[in-house]
Image (spheres, coloured by chain):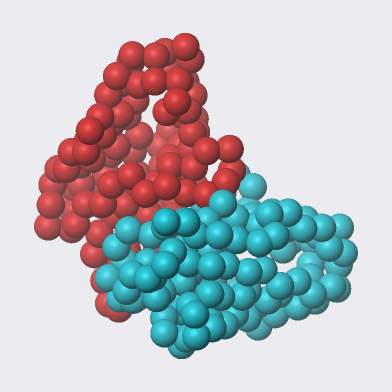
Amino acid sequence: SQQGEEDPQALSIQEGENATMNCSYKTSINNLQWYRQNSGRGLVHLILIRSNEREKHSGRLRVTLDTSKKSSSLLITASRAADTASYFCATSTQGGSEKLVFGKGTKLTVNP
Amino acid sequence: DAGVTQSPTHLIKTRGQHVTLRCSPISGHKSVSWYQQVLGQGPQFIFQYYEKEERGRGNFPDRFSARQFPNYSSELNVNALLLGDSALYLCASSLWWGTNEKLFFGSGTQLSVL
């Protein structure tokens, strides 16, 4: 079963614009991670935010976490054509579970 | 250093057959996890192994099994293949077990069951 739900399912923007993707989840978490996947191949880790953090930055990426609303957002600033990919949030739950639970993903298209 | 390597990259099988997928983790990584990704969905957890022991199992039937070898490489086996087993199978490695920190993924094995 999928824990997270990304919104929107698909997003198309122009180069230079900002892209915002949202993720909602159902149960308490230990941390939340964002991954990128190009053309249905391997996933690449982008950023991790722990349950006691509210915001984190990495280069052009900004992630926020609101545990009271069980939601997170990923902002990509000044997008480039190379950012075209599917983006997934993944949650690590408390209680000793070692698996990551992924959402269905947001497919981002950045038009040159 | 090489990343996570998986073989084969593509595989075509027929219903009822058996398949073995292989994964070599990043050098020094002791934990290997397997995920199944059906087209249009996010990856779903199948197994996690650490130090050759199973540390986690997802909601998959007993037709799915795995093991980890002394060199930390891993195999995923699927018996009695069904059409619904068609998917991208992803292997991921990490240094430790129990932290759910950053996972490093291979490029996957695309399995088609006809």
In the image, residue B78 lies at what x, y percent?
71, 74
Q: Is residue B15 left or right of residue B49?
A: right
Q: Residue furthest front?
A: B1
Q: What is chain B's hue in the picture?
A: cyan
Front-most of B42 and A77?
A: A77
In the image, residue B39 lies at what x, y percent?
64, 47
Callout count: 0
Front-most of B72 and A28?
A: B72
In the image, residue B104 lies at what x, y percent?
42, 57
Does residue A110 show up?
Answer: yes
Front-most of B55 and B44?
A: B55
Q: Is residue B44 left or right of residue A87?
A: right
Residue pictured at 42% horizontal, 47% vertical: A44
**Is residue A73 placed above or below A67 in the rendered structure?**
above
Q: What is chain A's hue in the picture?
A: red
Residue pictured at 37% horizontal, 66% vertical: B94
- Which of the 4 image quarters holds residue B114? bottom right
Residue pictured at 37% horizontal, 54% vertical: A90
**Is residue B48 placed above or below B9 in the rendered structure?**
below
**Is residue B114 placed above or below B51 in the rendered structure?**
above
Q: Is residue A93 left or right of residue A80?
A: left
In the image, residue A28 lies at what x, y percent?
25, 64
Residue pictured at 66% horizontal, 62% vertical: B7
Does residue B44 show up?
Answer: no
**Is residue B7 placed above or below B75 in the rendered structure?**
above
